[in-house]
Amino acid sequence: MAKGQSALEYMMTYGWAILIIVIVAVILYSMGIFNPRASVTATSSGFAPFTVSSTVCTPSYLAVAFSVGPLPGGATSAKVTRLTLSSPTGLNFSGSKSVSDSNNGFPTTAITVTTGTSFVINATNVGCTGSGIAFSAPGNLSYGVSNSAGKATYYATGTLVGTGSS
């Protein structure tokens, strides 16, 4: 009788804690916390005030679409002058590379953009190492603005991430 009472007291004392732990574990499992693939992001980040809306990479070119958010200092337009990528994985270069834009003559011609618009950089001098292979490259986007305080040059840093296509 004493052993049964002892077991019952143990379950009453610690049963609620065990039940809560089991419920929390089930909730975390259903949210995908224990799935290692769920923690790997496949989206580009950074580059504020610009937002990367899409990235397409093939063995022969890299295309990056940007949306323009509010510019610093109340500026209404900016001149994007250069996209520089460095330390890539899954791309066909190593080190640091200034990306040439086949549509706008990067890096010799600036792209003029305004708040609320979008633009695409089509780089024919950068490509992916293969279809289905993940790529990642940190970089910076150089741009200049003119506002009431004068002219200023800024660098928007971020990381381009995606998967190569054919």
Image: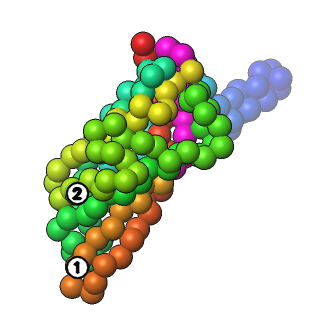
Residue identified by numbered label 2: 112
Q: Residues within 10 Å of mark 1 (few under 14, many from 20)?
A: some
Which badge, 2 or 1, is on the more N-terminal residue? 2
72 vs 154, left or right, is left
Q: Which residue is denoted by mark 1 in the rendering? A: 147
Q: Residue at x 41, y 31 (%)?
A: 124
Vertical comparison of 30 with 9: above or below:
above
For the C terminus, which image quadrant?
top left
Q: Tell me, yes or no, whether the two marked residues, 2 and 1, touch with CB atoms within 8 Å.
A: no
Can residue 104 be seen at all in this image of the molecule?
Answer: yes
Q: Quadrant of residue 97?
A: top right
Q: Secondary structure at mark 2?
A: strand
Label 1 sits on what residue type? Asn
Hey, which residue is sitting farthest bottom in the picture?
149
Q: Which percent across, then down, holds residue 41?
A: 50, 34
Helix, strand or loop at label 1? It is strand
**Residue drawn at x 36%, y 41% as measured from the top left:** 101
Q: Is residue 4 left or right of residue 96?
A: right
Nearer mark to the viewer, of 2 and 1: 2
Observer-nearest residue: 13 or 86?
86
Residue 78 % position (x, y): 26, 63
**Majority secondary structure of magenta residues:** strand
Region of the chain picked out in magenta, as a range: 130-139
Question: Where is residue 93 drawn, in percent x and y?
Answer: 60, 33
Look at the image and tell me whether residue 30 can be seen: no
